[in-house]
Amino acid sequence: MLGLILVQKLIIVHLGLDYVQLHICPCAPVPVQLVKQGLFPCSPVYPALAVSLDMLEFVSMLFVHLAPNETAWADALTSFLAR
């Protein structure tokens, strides 16, 4: 088909890293195809990386249930602000 380009994108899934191949054209941009496959593109125009929506949900739940560690947070913030 005229105008179709085959691209390969790195994706982060709950079991590690994987690649997905997409056929793109002006009528089907890469970010739209990734979202339809349950992946969140890390850039709105030319994403080179995408993260599984399941993985994002897991990380969100992890941060909600993670025990707070004020010392580690304060040390990280102090180091970051000292740069």
Image (tube, grey):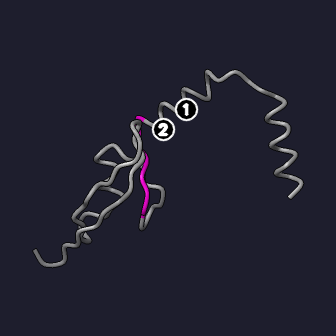
Query: What residue is pinned by disc 2?
Result: 56
Q: Quadrant of the N terminus?
A: bottom left
The residue lying furthest to the bottom in this view is 2
Quarter of the rendering containing residue 76: top right
Residue 61: percent from the left, percent from the top? 54, 26
Q: Residues within 10 Å of mark 1 (few under 14, many from 20)?
A: few
What's the residue at 48%, 30% (across, down)?
A: 58
Residue drawn at x 43%, y 57% is 49
Q: What is the x, y in percent for residue 79?
A: 85, 49
Name the image quarter holding the C terminus.
Answer: bottom right
Identify the residue under disc 1.
60
- Residue 15's spot in the image, x, y percent? 39, 37
- Image coords of residue 22 (percent x, y): 25, 61
Question: Which residues fall within the magenta stretch?
Answer: 47-54
**Dot 2: what SS?**
helix
Secondary element under disc 1, as helix, strand or loop, is helix
Report, in whole angstroms, how far the alpha carbon at label 1 lies from the one at label 2.
Answer: 6 Å
19, above or below 23, in the image: above
Residue 54 or residue 79, whichever sits in front: 79
Please say whether residue 9 is visible from this viewpoint: yes
Would residue 58 appear left or right of 71 to someone viewing this image? left
Q: Is residue 18 left or right of residue 65?
A: left
Query: Which residue type carries mark 1?
Result: Ser
Mark 1 and 2 residues: CB-CB less than 8 Å, in contact?
yes
Residue type at numbered disc 2: Leu
